[in-house]
């Protein structure tokens, strides 16, 4: 009888092909999105760094944010805390961004590390799937990140 510690799930077995397969080109080239911080959106591009060690957000003048893959847990659809913007003459905050196109990258402490918004729901779903595949590969098979 196999104990729970010795048995491996099918998803933990290293794949024969490239674990990032269909997402690699999109992750390297980058995807346009709006980065939300303190209730304000800024146009940026999110991509994986050249050494596949971190996620970077690129602005018009280069790298704006660098997030180590080791410090990230997952990417979820929906609004995060930074999507809330303040109403003009009130202290109340209202949700910002299109709800169906927003995503949140969570850190290891389940905190919102990066809040973003894509142009459409389809773009947000594709980016979420690509980022989750990248984070899964970084956690399970880090030697396969750069080479495939």
Image (cartoon, rainbow, N blue to C red):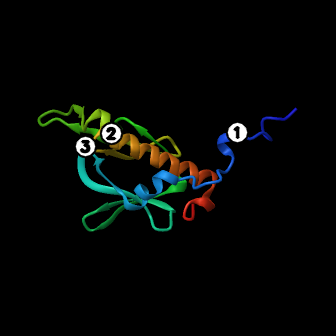
How far is disc 3 from disc 1 in space, using C-alphas? 41 Å
Q: Residue furthest right?
A: 1
* Crowdedness near tag 3: few (<14), some (14–19) or many (≥20) residues, C-alpha within 10 Å: some
Taking the spot 25% from the left edge, 36% from the top edge, the residue there is 98
- Cβ atoms under marks 3 and 1 closer than 8 Å: no
| Element assignment for label 2 | strand
* Crowdedness near tag 1: few (<14), some (14–19) or many (≥20) residues, C-alpha within 10 Å: few
Between label 2 and label 1, give the one nearer the viewer. 1
- Cβ atoms under marks 2 and 1 closer than 8 Å: no
Q: Is residue 48 rendered to the left or right of residue 82?
A: right
Between label 3 and label 1, give the one nearer the viewer. 1
- Quick one: quadrant of the N terminus? top right
Work out whether residue 73 can be spotted: no
Q: Which residue is mark 3?
A: 39
Q: Position of residue 25 (x, y in %)?
A: 43, 58
Q: In the rendered structure, which disc, 3 or 1, sits on the residue that comes first in sequence?
A: 1
- Quick one: quadrant of the C terminus? bottom right
Q: Which residue is mark 2?
A: 102
In the displayed structure, 17 sits above or below 128; it is below
| Element assignment for label 1 | loop
Q: Is residue 12 rendered to the left or right of residue 116?
A: right
Q: Is residue 128 rendered to the left or right of residue 40?
A: right
Q: In the rendered structure, which disc, 2 or 1, sits on the residue that comes first in sequence?
A: 1
Q: Position of residue 118 (x, y in %)?
A: 30, 45
Work out whether residue 118 can be spotted: yes
* Crowdedness near tag 2: few (<14), some (14–19) or many (≥20) residues, C-alpha within 10 Å: many
Mark sitting on residue 9: 1
């Amino acid at each position: 009888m196999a104990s729970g510690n010795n048995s491996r799930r099918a998803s933990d077995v290293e794949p024969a092909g490239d674990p990032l397969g269909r997402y690699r080109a999109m992750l390297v080239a980058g995807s346009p999105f709006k980065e939300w911080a303190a209730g304000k959106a800024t146009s940026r591009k999110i991509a994986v760094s050249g050494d596949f060690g971190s996620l970077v957000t690129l602005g018009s003048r280069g790298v704006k944010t660098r997030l180590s893959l080791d410090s990230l847990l997952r990417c979820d659809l929906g609004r995060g805390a930074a999507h809330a913007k303040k109403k003009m003459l009130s202290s109340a905050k209202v949700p910002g961004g299109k709800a169906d196109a927003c995503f949140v990258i969570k850190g290891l402490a389940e905190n919102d590390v990066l809040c973003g918004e894509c142009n459409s729901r389809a773009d947000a779903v594709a980016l979420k799937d690509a980022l989750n595949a990248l984070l899964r590969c970084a956690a399970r098979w880090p030697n396969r990140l750069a080479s495939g």
